[in-house]
Image (cartoon, rainbow, N blue to C red):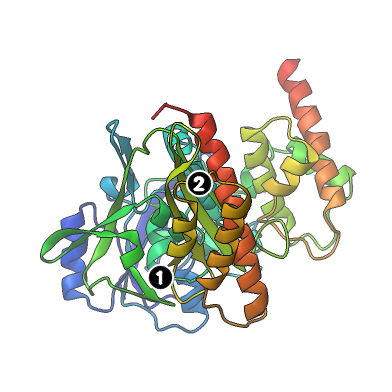
Amino acid sequence: MLSAMKYASPTTVAEAVDLLGYEPDARVYAGATDLIPQIRAGRPEPTVMVDLKRIARLCAISSNGSTHTVGAATPTADICAHDGLAAAFPGLVEASGLIGSDQIQSRSSWGGNLANASPAADTPPSLVVNDARAVIAGPDGERTVASADVATGPGTTSLGPAEIIVEFVLDEPPARTADAYLRLIPRTEMDIAVVGAAARVTLDGDGRVAAAAIALGAVAPTVVRAPHAEAALIGNEPAGDALAAVEAAAAAATDPIDDKRGTVAYRRQVAGVLARRAVSIAAERARERGGQS
Amino acid sequence: MSRVHVTCTINGDPAEFLCDGGQTLLDALRDEVGLTGAKEGCGTGDCGACSVVMDGRLLCSCLVLAPEAEGTTISTVEGMASGDDLHPLQQCFLEGAALQCGVCTPGFLVAARALLDRNPDPDETEIRYGLAGNLCRCTGYDKIVRAVQAAATEITAINES
């Protein structure tokens, strides 16, 4: 099994892109935690497995004060251990830590989580609410797109055949801003989201919501934003009627499927509840963050 | 097809082997190097029976391609004992009967050692989360958790003496 494939470990982005150009059936990977099980399950074998982890830029975390840059193949274990990221994006880091066991954490990455394009992936909703941009390299150079524009449906992406995600760029959050991520699974660990909800809230000096972003996972073919839920928060304290409106609007924003993990009605209701709770947690964190940025 | 030549360090010793590009590290350890401690349970990264540590990272060797091992330092369950002296985790698993069929045991031992290296005094919840990537289908987890707690106490005592 797996023995017909070749292995390549380019050390530069250009080398990786060149390789994909002349090996159209090659596949890039970071941790292969999804790709190898998919091949074992019968997906056609790539001609070449292209390991991206020997490219330094894809495994680097850096901050310059105003932006944070995280290599697309950086193991989520490193992301979770990074104090600067945890302080700036607590919800995104929590979502990163929810991917699988410690063994999987050694290998799983934001780039892989996004490019695998599972509707139930844990980090994409949090990447979206934090306006993370994906830097994508291909034969024509590099382009930058919103993380929300990478996955186009279950297992499909907007990436070209010789394109790879190089890194993610996130702005340092403004003052009184924080995020949160919640997911429902039937047990406490090691399962795939029935619903995931990410929220990010910016408060004004009076404790009212100045900006909000809410994104939901596992309730539609791709991550969905809940714009009416976001609008219901603006200008209000994140409490009472505003939170009730968030719950209703978030539930209405979903387009879930029935499967063994949950029914349409259940997923819709849980999406509303998790969105409301994620907003509450994000708002509490935003208060605690105060004026620091 | 040309095979890939890999040079690495396994359990403290220099090692080299030939592997196929698409061969997993688990298969290379077992079939090329002859270290059969790591087991294949699921082959999909769910059960942890193939756990090894590569360059300080605990991982499922069934999800690693063998050529990735080039230049790395790997530790497997075979490297835990010092000669005839079992590692405290191995001794506590034996004394606590924390195994039945034993297929999951090498993975649990390697994962438990990685956990104790990071957190020498874990509570029960931390042990259960720390070993959540390892499945046992016969004995159950209580004896395993208690064996890890006993080993943690013993290792701490050894380090303080």
Q: Position of residue A246 (x, y in %)?
A: 55, 59
Q: Chain of mark 2?
A: A
Please indicate, yes or no, whether residue A30 appears anywhere in the rendered image.
Answer: yes
Q: Position of residue A64 (x, y in %)?
A: 27, 32
Q: Which residue is located at x 81 percent, y 45 percent? A: B145
Mark 2 Cα-neighbour bin, 10 Å: few <14, some 14–19, many ≥20: some
Image vertical order of residue B116 relative to residue A133, above or below? above
- Spatial CA distance of label 2 from label 1 is 56 Å
Q: Which residue is located at x 44 percent, y 70 percent? A: A35
Secondary structure beneath label 1:
loop
- In the image, A129 versus A158, the foreground residue is A129
Q: Position of residue A238 (x, y in %)?
A: 56, 46
Secondary structure beneath label 2:
loop
Q: Which residue is located at x 73 percent, y 30 percent? A: B121
Q: Position of residue A122 (x, y in %)?
A: 51, 59
Q: Quadrant of the C terminus of chain A?
A: top left
Q: Nearer the viewer, mark 2 or mark 1?
A: 2
- In the image, B40 versus A161, the foreground residue is A161
Image vertical order of residue A121 relative to residue B150, above or below? below
Residues tagged 2 and 1 counted as in contact (Cβ below 8 A): no
Tell whether A259 sits left or right of A42.
right
Q: Which mark is residue B93?
A: none
Using the rendered view, name the quadrant where residue A263 is placed. bottom right
Residue topped by disc 1: B22
Residue topped by disc 2: A236
Amino acid type of disc 2? Asn
Mark 1 Cα-neighbour bin, 10 Å: few <14, some 14–19, many ≥20: many
Please indicate, yes or no, whether residue B45 appears anywhere in the rendered image.
Answer: no
Amino acid type of disc 1? Gly
